[in-house]
Image (cartoon, rainbow, N blue to C red):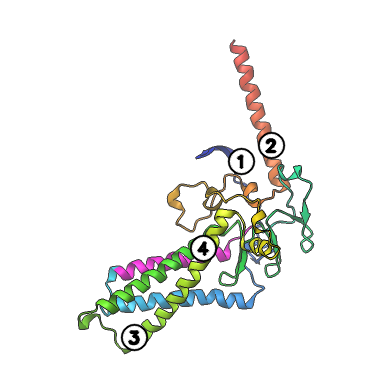
Amino acid sequence: MIREDEGPSGQYYRDDFNDHPGRCSAGTTDEDGIWLNQNDGAGTIMCIMVWILLGYSCLTITLLAQTGGISVYQSFIYTILVTMALACHVKTTLSDPGSVPASAVPTEAQRKYDKLSMCSQCQTYKPPLSHHCRICNRCISKMDHHCPWMNNCVGAGNLKHFFLFLVYTWSCSVYCLVLLGWNYFFCASDDCEFNMVLTQLVRIMTLLCIGSFLFTSSMIMNVVYGFMTGVGTIDRLKKKATNTINDSMEEPLRMIDIFGIGPWYTWPFPVDAIFEDYDLVMGFSTPQRLLREQILRERQDEKLQQQQGVNIGSV
């Protein structure tokens, strides 16, 4: 079903038709109904490790709260941050990053240019800024990189979830280091001292938080740089290798092309973004979507002609 609607930037149309397959199979092909990369064993292990490490940190903080090392409210806040980070991790892993289907065709604006490329691996249209991932075995629209910690590519379809995961994980690291540092420097009674087991847990926790803080800080700066320049990690590395980084013609990414046109208070949550122009964000269209757009235009033209006829008749 397609219908007209009103958004913050004016009128747009919402396409509620489901082009996805109905099969309940997991994989990265067009026929799979659930997106899940099963071609990388190392990536699967690293993906599971994220849950183990975040779960370990949450358990350590909970034990500290039970022994009086920190307050229960501080433990509750940390648990919320971990929950949000894991929710964003799941969305990043199980979301289609922007795979280019076999039926992909250039948009109307792209047809005006002569340089249209095809993927030699997929034998399909290759949109601008897209790359073929050998692990996922798919072309990914606006592919930034393949992240083994997510066991998935990061592209136009899950960039929001990936960025939120980095922000929440960074927040967990900073908050935990602040709690442990405060306890270490300002502990003035026996109630806030750690026992032997907790001491070892906290030492490991401190090392993990420092490593996580450094890693997520560098990744956040890398992603934000991509937002500001419109150049992803792969394209940036290629331009640096050919010394053409200053010749980039890409435009900065708009926030609505990352977080969608929904209210701003939905941005911090791992919900799928609704794009103002899906084809513009993904860089391609499909014959099915083009046909539905044509039908919508014809309906709009009929309504306009009817309104003009009514106005002429009333005069």
Closer to us: mark 1 or mark 4?
Answer: 4
Q: Nearest the camera: 57 or 1?
A: 57
Closer to us: mark 1 or mark 3?
Answer: 3
Distance from Cα at disc 1 to Cα at disc 4: 39 Å
Q: Which mark is first along the chain, 3 or 1?
A: 1
Distance from Cα at disc 2 to Cα at disc 3: 67 Å
The residue to which callout 1 is attached is: 2
Q: Crowding at label 2, few (<14), some or many (≥20) Cα neighbours within 10 Å?
A: few
The residue to which callout 4 is attached is: 221
Q: Is residue 271 visible?
A: yes
Q: Which mark is first along the chain, 1 or 2?
A: 1
Question: Which disc is residue 199 wearing?
Answer: 3
Question: Which percent across, then down, holds residue 103?
Answer: 74, 53
Q: Crowding at label 4, few (<14), some or many (≥20) Cα neighbours within 10 Å?
A: few
Rendering quarter of residue 299: top right
Q: Crowding at label 1, few (<14), some or many (≥20) Cα neighbours within 10 Å?
A: few
Tell me the element at label 3: helix
| On screen, residue 191 above or below 310 | below
Look at the numbered discs 2 and 1 and tell me whether their residues touch, using CB distance below 8 Å: yes
Question: Which percent across, then down, holds residue 63?
Answer: 33, 79
Task: Give the main secondary structure, helix, strand or loop, of the magenta stretch.
Answer: helix
Q: Residue at x 42, y 68 (%)?
A: 82
Closer to us: mark 3 or mark 4?
Answer: 4
Instruction: Report the amino acid beneath label 2.
Output: Ile
Give, as a single range, the part of the protein colored magenta. Answer: 74-98
Q: Is residue 69 visible?
A: no
Q: Nearest the camera: 61 or 175?
A: 175
Q: Which mark is first along the chain, 3 or 2?
A: 3
Tell me the element at label 1: strand
The residue to which callout 2 is attached is: 295
